[in-house]
Image: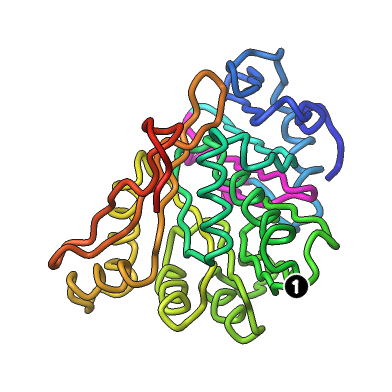
Amino acid sequence: MTTGRLTALLTDEVNDVLVTDDGLVWVDTGDALVTHGHIDAHTLQVELERILAASGRRLDRMNPVIDVGLEGGARLCAVGPPVAVGGVQVALRRHRQTTPRLDAFGDRSTAGVLRTLVRRRANIVVSGATGAGKTTLVRSLLAECGTGADPTQRIITVEDTNELSLPPGSHTHLVRLETRPPSSEGTPTISAEDLVRTALRLRPDRIVVGEVRGDEVIALVHALNTGHRGCITTCHANSARDALERLTTLMIRAAPTWPTTVVRQQLARSIDVIIHMDRVAGQRRIADICRVTLDGEQVTTHPAVVGSVHGGAPSL
């Protein structure tokens, strides 16, 4: 990624760099959102052109919304006129490349449950808000696959951007797939749905989808319901129950002819556990670990762990 004024701010201590339409630069360290000077419109335009050069994209009135992955796992979202009223809005995000031990997300009991889930090849959804630590937890769970579980497992990741940033050699069999947006030259889109189907043909032991937010949910649930165990994905939600509702909604949108009861049955059969992440005072912690069950025609969540999160001894 080309270094400029904005990208230089993406240090290990920074989660996001934001630019508002008045040219103010903001930096989110996880603990606070603070101002970091001003950038004029011309300098911002030149820097955005430099950042976007490798992707073949450009921000202009014909293409006023840009969302693109950058080298090194960073991501740029920029919105300009006429969509952004008043001027260009920019958000640069870089996932920290740390892989904490599972103990960092709770006490030893909670970490033990996480290791058990990996070892038993549970199908896991990690939910939480932006910046709650979903990607970091997934990276730590995959690190456990490479050490505590079978280190020869073939892991296939599907992402819009290589945010997991699993280094080559970290796993014996690691296949990393990235989506491709349409370009101004007319190159066709390669979607997450396409890549989940591709992953199924590549003899996976585990499939990891960076974030489920569209029609790929159908292909993923199909994979989970056809014997593929130990899969992991994430979704944005305010709680484990909200994550389940969001997945239900995504499936109904993707398969509108499916009865709601069938959608719920498919989810209950495919997802074992939802781990909900939260961020309090800059600290990323596990708020809930819930089992997914089918009660009659309703798919619901039940607390699966009572440990550092809720008090008491861990249980599955």
Amino acid type at circle 1 is Thr
State left or right for residue 301 relative to residue 277.
Answer: left
Q: Which image quadrant for residue 45?
A: top right
Whether residue 43 is visible here, answered yes or no, is: no
**Extent of the magenta region:** 60-85
The image shows residue 172, relative to residue 225, as above or below, that is above
Q: In this figure, which colouring scheme has been used for the structure?
A: rainbow
Answer with the quarter of the image where residue 10 lies: top right
**Residue 62 shown in magenta:** yes
- 292 falls in the magenta region: no
* Picture coordinates of residue 39, whole percent (x, y): 72, 20
Position in image of residue 77 (x %, y %): 60, 42
Q: Quadrant of residue 98?
A: top right
Neighbor class of circle 1 (other Cα within 10 Å; few <14, some 14-19, many 20+) is some
Q: Mark 1 = which residue?
A: 152
Q: Residue at x 75, y 58 (%)?
A: 56
Q: Is residue 94 above or below residue 53?
A: above
Q: Residue furthest front?
A: 313
